[in-house]
Amino acid sequence: MLIVQKFGGTSLAGRERILAAARIIAQAAKRGSRVVAVASAQGRTTDELIAQAISINPRATAREMDAILSTGEQLSAGFLAMALQAMGHPAVSLTGWQAGLRTDNVHGSARILGLEHDRILRELAGGKIVLVAGFQGVDGAGDITTLGRGGSDTTAVALAGFLQADLCQIYTDVDGVYDKDPRLYPDAVKFDWISYEKMRRLIAAGAQVLHDRSVELAQQFGMSLEVLSAFTGQPGTIVCGESAGQAALHGL
Ligand code: ADP
Ligand code: ASP
Ligand code: MG
C-alpha cells in the first residue's frame, strides 16, 4: 500500500505540531505502508517571506520570489524528516525538484507537467519515508517554480496520481469539507463525501480549503482524496467521483 499524506501550514506550526504530524506519518509506516508525505510551510511563513522580499525590492522578479518562497516548504519537510528519524524511522526530505516534479515556467502559478519518479521510488525501495516540500517544482530551464497560494494540495495530488498511490490524505486544521466555512459559521454542515464537481463549485465560490488545481488534477487521475483533521483523528470528507460517492453511501 502506498499512501500520500499532505500536512497544511497550521498543522505544522511549531515543534509540538511537527511531532504530532510525524506521529501520524509514523503510524501509517508502522502499519506497513510506504509513505510519501507532503509538507506546507509552517503557519504564516509564506506571508512573512513575501513581506520580507517586498521590503527589499517591491519589484522583485517572479523568478527570485519563487526561489525565496520555496524555502518555507523545504524547512517543514526537513523538520518532519528529522522528527521521524528521532522516532527511529528512516526518512529523507526532498525539495520539489529533487522529487522530480516538472512544471511549466509560469513563476508564481506554475502548472505541473509530470513527475520523474525515479528518486522517490528509489528512496521508498530503500525503506525510507519520503518527505516532499510542497508548492514547488522545476521548469525546463532548471529554475525553481511555485504552484500558486495553497499549492501544496496540488503537489500531494500530483504525487499520488503519478505514483498511483492507494490513498491520498489531506491533513488540515478542520475535520473535513463543510457546506460553508465552519470557522465563520457554527451551523455549517460537514460532508461525508463530495463530488469533484461540487467541490470545484465550492472553491469557485471562495472556499479555500483545497487548491482549485488539486481537485482538477484529482478528477483527471480519478483519484479520491480524504480531507481530514491533523488534530482529532476523526474521519474526514472524501472528495471523489459521483459514482464512487454513491457506492460508498450505499455500502457497496
Ligand atoms: P491548510 O493550511 O491545511 O492548507 P487552509 O487554510 O488552506 O489549510 O484550508 C483550511 C481552512 O479552510 C479552514 O481552516 C477553514 O477555515 C477554511 N474553509 C473555507 N471554506 C471551507 C469549507 N467549506 N469547508 C471546510 N473548510 C473551509
Ligand atoms: N505555503 C504556500 C502558501 O501559503 C503553499 C501552501 O500552503 O499550500 O500558499
Ligand atoms: Mg491550504
Image: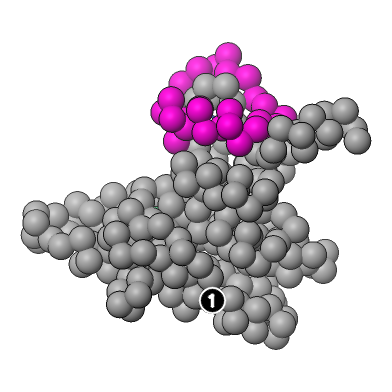
Task: Quarter of the image for the N terminus: give it.
Answer: bottom right
| x and y percentages locating residue 130 in the rendered image | 61, 73
| x and y percentages locating residue 97 in the rendered image | 43, 75
The count of marks equals 1
Q: Is residue 204 left or right of residue 227?
A: left
Position of 98 relative to 74 (above/below): below
Q: Is residue 122 left or right of residue 158?
A: right
Task: Quarter of the image for the C terminus: give it.
Answer: top right
Quadrant in the rendering for residue 26 = bottom right
Q: Is residue 99 left or right of residue 110?
A: right
Question: Which residue is drawn at the image coordinates 55% and 43% (left, top)?
Answer: 215
| x and y percentages locating residue 41 in the rendered image | 41, 57
Q: Is residue 194 visible?
A: yes
Q: Name the kind of residue labelled 1 in the image.
A: Glu
Residue 4: within the magenta? Answer: no
| x and y percentages locating residue 122 in the rendered image | 65, 84
Residue 204: within the magenta? Answer: yes
Q: Which residue is mark 1?
A: 116
Question: Which residue is drawn at the image coordinates 61% and 65% (left, top)?
Answer: 162
Is the CB of the residue bearing disc 1 within 8 angstroms of ligand 2? no
Span highlighted in magenta in the image? 184-208
User: Could you say which is closer to the camera, residue 31 or residue 201?
Assistant: 201
Q: How is the image coloured?
A: one colour
Question: Which residue is drawn at the image coordinates 74% and 38% (left, top)?
Answer: 235
Q: Is residue 26 visible?
A: no
Position of 200 relative to 125 (above/below): above
Q: Residues within 10 Å of mark 1 (few under 14, many from 20)?
A: some
Question: SS at mark 1?
Answer: loop
